[in-house]
Amino acid sequence: MKNLTQPSFLTFVVGAILLFLGIGMKANGESGNIILYIGVGLIGIFWLWSIVKVVTAADMRPFQKRFWMIVVIAAPVIGGLVFHVLHRKAGKIVS
C-alpha cells in the first residue's frame, strides 16, 4: 500500500475530488468551471506522471515496461491508476 501514498497517486485523488466537486458546482456558475478545470488538469498531470514512472522504472523488464506503457496509454487514467495500485515494489510486480 506504499504506492497509494506517493505524490503521483495523491495527485489523482485530489484531481478526482476536484473534478466531481466541479461537476456538482457547475450549475452555480463560474467557480464550478474553475474547479472542474483544475481537477481535469491534475488528472492530466497524473496521467503524464504515470507514463514517466513506467519509462523510468528500473525494476521492470523490457516486456513489462512495454505492457504497462500500452495499458497506461490505451486507457489513460484507468491504466495509470491500475499501474500505481499493482506496481508494488522492486522485484515484486503484479502483471
Image: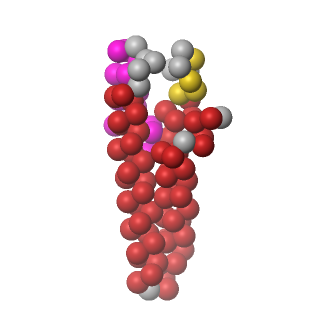
Q: Residue at x 50, y 40 (%)?
A: 81
Q: Residue furthest bottom?
A: 29
Is 74 left or right of 13, judged from the image as shown? left
Q: Nearer the viewer, residue 52 or 31?
A: 52
Q: Residue at x 55, y 62 (%)?
A: 17
* Figure check: 37 above or below 50: below
Colouring mode (rainbow / by chain / secondary structure / one colour):
secondary structure
Residue 67 sits in quarter: top left
Q: What secondary structure characterizes most of the magenta part?
A: helix
User: In percent of the image, x 41 and y 76: which residue is there?
Assistant: 33
Q: Is residue 76 visible?
A: no
Q: Residue at x 37, y 22 (%)?
A: 65
- Say how many tags the image has: 0
> What is the span of residues highlighted in magenta in the rendered image?
62-80
Q: Give the image location of residue 70, x and y in percent.
A: 35, 29
Indicate the position of residue 85 as horizontal and vertical percent values.
57, 35
Residue 38 shows up from this direction: yes
- Magenta span includes 72: yes
**Viewport quadrant of the N terminus:** top right
Residue placed most toward the observer, 74 or 84: 84
Q: Is residue 86 magenta?
A: no
